[in-house]
Amino acid sequence: MTMPPAGWYPSAEDPATKKYWDGSRWLDIPAPDVQPAKNRKRLSKRSILILSIVGAIVVLGTAGGLVWKSIADQKEEERLALIEERAQEREAERAEAAEKAAEEEAAAQEKVDDALRAMRQDSVTDIEESAKALAEGHVADGALTGPILSVSCRPTGVVRLTILTRALLFSSASRPTSITATGR
């Protein structure tokens, strides 16, 4: 008896399923899903031409869109670079204006400081003259004895009088006595 060749055969238990015969025994493997081949129609030359034209339009449209996007991106980058450059120029102008204002303020403060120094110097001279007149008045009244050697005043508010007086308690010799008065 000849055995059937290897292949897929309907199952004896369930004719809707198939089993595989390897030529000598049945194998328990699942049957493949085999669909009968459909008759495919060939596309006509006209359909191929239309699909080619549509494909070419899609390709050209995509390429054109990419070119347009590239140009638009480049213009946007140039616009942003110009905006950044203008912002840097404005910042440099602001910094220059702030520096100029600071220099002008420093110059104005220097003028104020010079005026205050001059006013203090004038005040020092006035205070020295006033202290000398007061000391001369005391010498004239006899409260102090001896000539006034010097009167000096510093803008810090210290007035120093050096008067030659006769020290009554220590000796009868004349010696300079310094009197310092602090006032503001």
Image (spheres, rainbow, N blue to C red):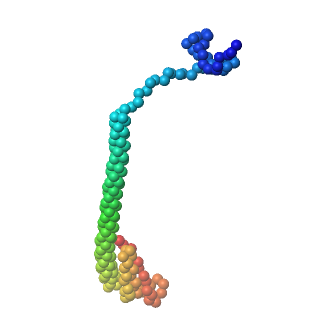
Of all residues, the one furthest to the top in this rendering is 13
Q: Taking 46 as reference, is 15 above or below it?
A: above
Which of the image's four quarters has the N terminus? top right
Q: Is residue 3 left or right of residue 122?
A: right
Q: Is residue 150 left or right of residue 4?
A: left
> Which residue sits at x=33%, y=52%?
71
Tell me the quarter of the picture where residue 140 sits.
bottom left
> Which residue sits at x=58%, y=20%?
31
Q: Position of residue 131 (x, y in %)?
A: 33, 80
> Which residue sits at x=40%, y=84%?
162
Q: Position of residue 24 (x, y in %)?
A: 69, 18
Quick one: 91 or 160, which is closer to the camera? 91
Q: Position of residue 99 (x, y in %)?
A: 33, 67
Quick one: 116 or 182, which is closer to the camera? 116
Quick one: 91 or 67, which is closer to the camera? 67
> Which residue sits at x=39%, y=85%?
163
Q: Taking 79 as reference, is 123 above or below it?
A: below
Count of numbered marks: 0
Q: Is residue 69 visible?
A: no
Q: Is residue 152 visible?
A: yes
Q: Position of residue 14 (x, y in %)?
A: 58, 10
Q: Is residue 17 left or right of residue 72?
A: right
Which of the image's four quarters has the C terminus? bottom left
